[in-house]
Image: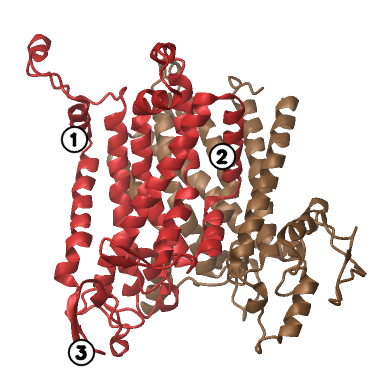
């Protein structure tokens, strides 16, 4: 395991070549993390499945209307005569309590779960980075105020906050059209709810980084040159703290997907007929014994996605750490 | 040290006020709690009005918050709806330890919570012990046998365990150990509740019913923490004083347990201490799935009934527990690690 491979070219030869860009360096380190590489492959397969799978697996005749349906319409077609069918040729993952095809629903539910994961992280990053950067850069009473509010948010466990917020603002947003699809308003609500209850740790990381960076000479130089505060923060400080932001937002997607699953599991998240991996688990407890396919497939999808994202995050952490000892 | 404690306590007071105000305002958007009162015939509009007055729900939000906070025994309230306050209030308010009454069954919140709290604490206490014992054991063993078969297998297992959503894990365990074991004629575990009503609330029954919730609550934490113990153990094992101890001819297990483990577990203490109150929240899903009569399940039922005094009670008690354990952890850590000086 500990064989040392000597570089094939000597240091002098290497210097004649083009130096590696940070991106290339990062990729070289990432590649060394075999599990992360494998997870990246798995993630690509998962993305293809939920992106293109609908074209292959989500088509068929919807018995009650007799129409031939494709895409999401098929996933939402309920045929009560076919309810709770075990996996078969026609329905490889079985059917749910009102006869919808579970395979098709894992595809469209996956789109919703991943959309929520990604957009919730965008909200999280915007809030967390702004709070952290402003608190760290300006210091003084602004820092005190923002950090006390951050701590106050951390006093209540985030699952409680999630549940209370979803109950309070759930159902208040109407259905919206986006990318040619109708999204239940609950999707938007849940994105903001997850985003607003998860930014605190990121804010602390960014603040700590900004606090140490702002004492550096190049920042004093920028200030002496009269560069504006906003420009110092966005052009000089944040690019230097991008590594932890990338790592924690990658892991944040996994957390957001799990949070969505928990809230929807309690019936407070994404509302049907829109499928999400979380709300597919919703009534599963009642059918624990009679229809295990009901909860097994969406549950496994969540697990696989979270597993892949966690490995990728782990690989990114190694790849982005400048003190990383991995051989480049 | 005393200064530090005082400052932390003083800091947390406005934070608790802030969070209570925000939560209280959010709960105003929960919908009408009267509508979810468990009565078969919907109340007549006049009854509804009277009920709202009795519960104090007719007042503006800020008055309701003040009453929740400071009680209303110092003012008179209008009970008969003629616009003239005549009945003296009876509530003492949260600041004097009165969390109000449940809107649904009129019982004091503190009574409802203290009824459920022992069940949750029992579950959590066992879970916490299981987590500490197993993550230390697995973490240390993985570290001293780094890259062995066990270490590699356990790494894989812990990543999978860490990625498991609680409902999937709980349902899988129930399916395997209750339903399949029953089908195969093996001794099987009960799925829901705290004891079999036909046998009664005996310690044996409770222990039997606790196995599945404890396992499903602890696996995810063990997966995460054992990695943490492993890496801090590896870090300590690479230090010079460990080599010195080995060079003196001390036996390996003494070096590992007496010298390395003591230092390696220091950060673990913080982790566990900060985690204790959060386990209360983690129990929300597990208690719901396994129908364990604890505070987590009380929270979920109260959410569906919009019973906000109960919700506020649970949330504020949890908040106090978090503040308390943060402080205890900080203090414990400064005793355990003399390098840390808190000021």
Image x and y of residue A252, in percent: 39, 46
The answer to whether residue B64 shows anywhere in this view is yes
The answer to whether residue B147 shows anywhere in this view is no
Residue A250 drawn above or below residue A23: below
CB within 8 Å, label 2 to label 1: no
Q: Name the residue that disc number 1 marks.
A: A31
Q: Residues within 10 Å of mark 2 (few under 14, many from 20)?
A: many
In this view, the residue in front, A242 or B108, is A242
Res. B225 image quadrant: top left
Rendered hue of chain A is red
Per the model, the C-alpha gap separating discs 3 and 1 is: 51 Å
Q: Name the residue that disc number 2 marks.
A: A150
- Chain at numbered mark 2: A
Residue B92 drawn above or below residue B303: above
Res. B150 image quadrant: top left
In the picture, measured across the screen, residue B71 lies left or right of residue A250, that is right
Q: Secondary structure at mark 2?
A: helix
Q: Residues within 10 Å of mark 3 (few under 14, many from 20)?
A: few
Q: Which chain is brown?
A: B
* N-term-proximal mark, 3 vs 2: 3
Give the residue furthest to the top.
Answer: A12
Q: Secondary structure at mark 1?
A: helix
In the picture, measured across the screen, residue B326 lies left or right of residue A226, that is right
């Amino acid at each position: 395991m500990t064989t040392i491979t000597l570089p094939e070219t000597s240091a002098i030869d290497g210097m004649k070549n083009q130096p590696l860009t940070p991106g290339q360096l990062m990729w070289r380190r990432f590649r060394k993390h075999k599990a992360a590489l494998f997870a990246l492959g798995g993630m690509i397969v998962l993305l293809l499945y939920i992106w293109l799978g609908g074209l292959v697996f989500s088509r068929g005749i919807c018995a009650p209307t007799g129409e031939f349906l494709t895409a999401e319409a098929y996933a939402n077609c309920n045929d009560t005569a076919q309810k709770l069918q075990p996996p078969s040729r026609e329905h490889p993952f079985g059917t749910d309590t009102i006869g919808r095809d579970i395979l098709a629903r894992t595809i469209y539910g996956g789109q919703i779960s991943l959309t929520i994961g990604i957009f919730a992280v965008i909200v999280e990053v915007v809030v967390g980075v702004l709070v952290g950067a402003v608190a760290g850069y300006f210091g003084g009473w602004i820092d005190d105020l923002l950090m006390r509010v951050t701590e106050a948010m951390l006093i209540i466990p985030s699952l409680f906050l999630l549940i209370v917020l979803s109950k309070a603002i759930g159902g208040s947003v109407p259905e919206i059209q986006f990318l040619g699809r109708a999204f239940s308003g609950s999707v938007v609500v849940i994105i903001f709810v997850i985003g607003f209850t998860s930014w605190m740790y990121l804010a602390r990381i960014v603040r700590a980084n900004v606090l140490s960076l702002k004492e550096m000479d190049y920042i004093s130089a920028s200030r002496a040159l009269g560069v504006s505060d906003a420009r110092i923060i966005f052009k000089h400080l944040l690019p230097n703290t991008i590594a932890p932001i990338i790592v924690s937002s990658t892991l944040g997607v996994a957390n957001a997907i799990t949070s969505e699953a928990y809230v929807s599991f309690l019936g407070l998240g994404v509302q049907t007929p829109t499928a999400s991996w979380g709300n597919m688990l919703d009534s599963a407890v009642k059918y624990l014994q009679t229809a295990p396919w009901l909860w097994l497939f969406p549950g496994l999808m969540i697990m696989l996605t979270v597993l892949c994202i966690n490995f990728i995050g782990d690989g990114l952490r190694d790849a982005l750490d400048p003190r990383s000892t991995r051989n480049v | 040290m005393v200064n530090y404690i005082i400052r932390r306590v003083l800091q947390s007071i406005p934070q608790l006020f802030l969070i209570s105000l925000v939560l209280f305002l959010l709960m105003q958007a929960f919908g009408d709690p009267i509508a979810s009162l468990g009565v078969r015939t919907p109340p007549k509009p006049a009854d509804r009005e009277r009920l709202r007055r009795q519960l104090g729900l007719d007042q503006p939000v800020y008055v309701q918050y003040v009453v929740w906070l400071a009680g209303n025994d110092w003012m008179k309230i209008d009970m008969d709806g003629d616009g003239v306050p005549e009945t003296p209030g009876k509530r003492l308010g949260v600041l004097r330890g009165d969390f109000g009454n449940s809107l649904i069954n009129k019982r004091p919140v503190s009574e409802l919570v203290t009824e459920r709290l022992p069940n949750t604490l029992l579950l959590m206490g066992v879970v916490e012990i299981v987590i500490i014992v197993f993550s230390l054991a697995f973490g240390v063993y993985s570290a001293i046998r780094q890259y062995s078969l066990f270490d590699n297998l356990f790494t894989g297992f812990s990543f999978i365990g860490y990625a498991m959503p609680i409902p999937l894990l709980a349902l899988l365990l129930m399916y395997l150990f209750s339903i399949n074991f029953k089908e195969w004629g093996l001794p099987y575990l009960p799925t829901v509740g705290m004891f079999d009503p036909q046998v009664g609330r005996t310690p044996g029954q409770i222990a039997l019913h606790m196995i599945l919730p404890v396992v499903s609550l602890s696996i995810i934490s063990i997966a995460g923490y054992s990695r943490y113990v492993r890496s801090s153990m590896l870090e300590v094992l690479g230090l010079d004083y460990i080599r010195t101890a080995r060079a003196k001819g001390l036996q390996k297990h003494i070096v590992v347990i007496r010298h390395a483990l003591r230092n390696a577990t220091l950060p673990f203490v913080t982790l566990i201490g900060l985690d204790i109150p959060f386990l209360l929240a983690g129990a929300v899903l597990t208690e719901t799935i396994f129908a364990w009569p604890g505070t987590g399940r009380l929270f979920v039922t109260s959410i569906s009934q919009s019973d906000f005094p109960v919700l506020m009670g649970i949330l504020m008690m949890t908040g106090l527990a978090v503040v308390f354990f943060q402080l205890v952890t900080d203090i414990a850590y400064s005793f355990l690690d003399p390098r840390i000086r808190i000021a």
